[in-house]
Amino acid sequence: MSFSYDTKCELCTIKLKNDCCKLSQLYGMVLFAQNIGSDSLKITTENVLIVNLLSELAENVAGVYFVIDETVNLYTLEIKGDALKKLYDILYITVNGKIDLLVSGVLTENDCCTDAFLRGAFLIGGYTSNPENSYHFEISTPYYTLAMSMKDFMQRLNFPVRVIVRKSNYVLYIKDSEEIERLLYRIGAKKSAFAFIDMKIQKEMNNYSNRVNNTKLHNIEKTINKSVEQVKAIKKISEKIGLDSLDSDLMLAARLRCENPDKSLNELVLISGNKFSRSGLSRRLNKLTEIALKLGD
Ligand SMILES: [Zn+2]
């Protein structure tokens, strides 16, 4: 399955010890439902562990039950009527014709509850990309006021959240890999956070070795191009005026190059038995190119 899916599975296994946190996590899950109405609340998920967790929390904390509908790869949990009213009351969600969708300070006050709330929000509205491909964490909601309130809430926790609109959803997202690690760790996805760091390091190492290999290849290519050019020049000199017309050092340099067209300058120096210095040989090979150039076509 995906990195995001695995992360959510890990979060579902966390045992919530405090009643305050159970309430906050349920609050996060309900608030980031895809459909929040005054007489119906609908939450969809593809993850059966989330279905179980949500049902358990609703029963445990509010004594209410979701009706679960299962279609191919998707579960819809719905709650209506008095049960919904009870759920809203417990979560301080007020309905006066219009639902007040702001992140409540009451249910996110303690540090433990802040984390539980974020975890709940991520489980229902969240997604985190596979760090092998990109760094992207998001929580989305179709409700504008909730998105803005969540943005403030997360920014107060020093997470650099931005918002975009995508298909009538407000998407709060983070691209900074270190902040994503911090957030995953904070909501309790420790295994995922470490896997994230591991993959990031692996990716950076691969990028580094690719860069090194590219540089090496580039250098080899440069050497070969230069050598081809020099051999051509020497051939031209040989045909037009003969290599005998050159002084002995130039002649030796010409022979060295023609006999070893695939060798670098350093290697040629070694083959010559250090008769030339690197710069001395380079100067002579350049001189040969120069002479050929003067000879015209
Ligand atoms: Zn708590």
Image: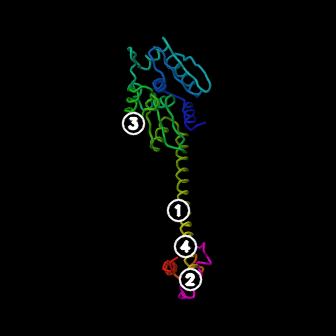
Which residue does the numbered mark 4 point to in the structure image? Answer: 229
Residue 198: give x, y in percent of width and height: 55, 47
Name which residue type carries label 4.
Glu
Looking at numbered disc 2 in the image, what kind of residue is underneath it?
Lys
SS category of the residue bearing label 2: helix
Q: Are marks 1 and 3 in contact (CB under 8 Å)?
A: no
Q: What is the crowding at mark 3: few (fewer than 14 residues within 10 Å), some, or many (at least 20)?
A: few
Mark 3 C-beta closer than 8 Å to ligand 1: no
Question: Picture quarter containing residue 44?
Answer: top right
Mark linked to residue 10: none
Residue pointed to by mark 3: 157
- Graded by Cα atoms within 10 Å as few (under 14), some (14 to 19) or many (20 or more), the crowding at tag 1 reads few
- Does the segment drawn in magenta span residue 258? yes
Circle number at residue 240: 2
CA distance separating discs 1 and 3: 43 Å
- What is the spatial separation of the Cα atoms under label 4 and label 2, in whole angstroms? 17 Å
Q: Which residue is mark 1?
A: 215
| SS at badge 3 | loop
Residue depicted at x 54% and y 73%: 229
> Which numbered mark, 4 or 1, is in the foreground of this view?
4
Q: Nearer the viewer, mark 3 or mark 4?
A: 4
Q: Earlier in the sequence, mark 2 or mark 1?
A: 1
Q: Is residue 40 above or below residue 133?
A: above
| Residue 165 on image: x %, y % | 43, 32
Predominant SS along the magenta part: helix
Residue 51: x %, y % from top left: 57, 24
Label 4 – label 1 distance at C-alpha: 21 Å
Amino acid at circle 3: Leu
Mark 4 close to ligand 1, CB under 8 Å = no
Q: CA distance from mark 2 to mark 3?
A: 79 Å
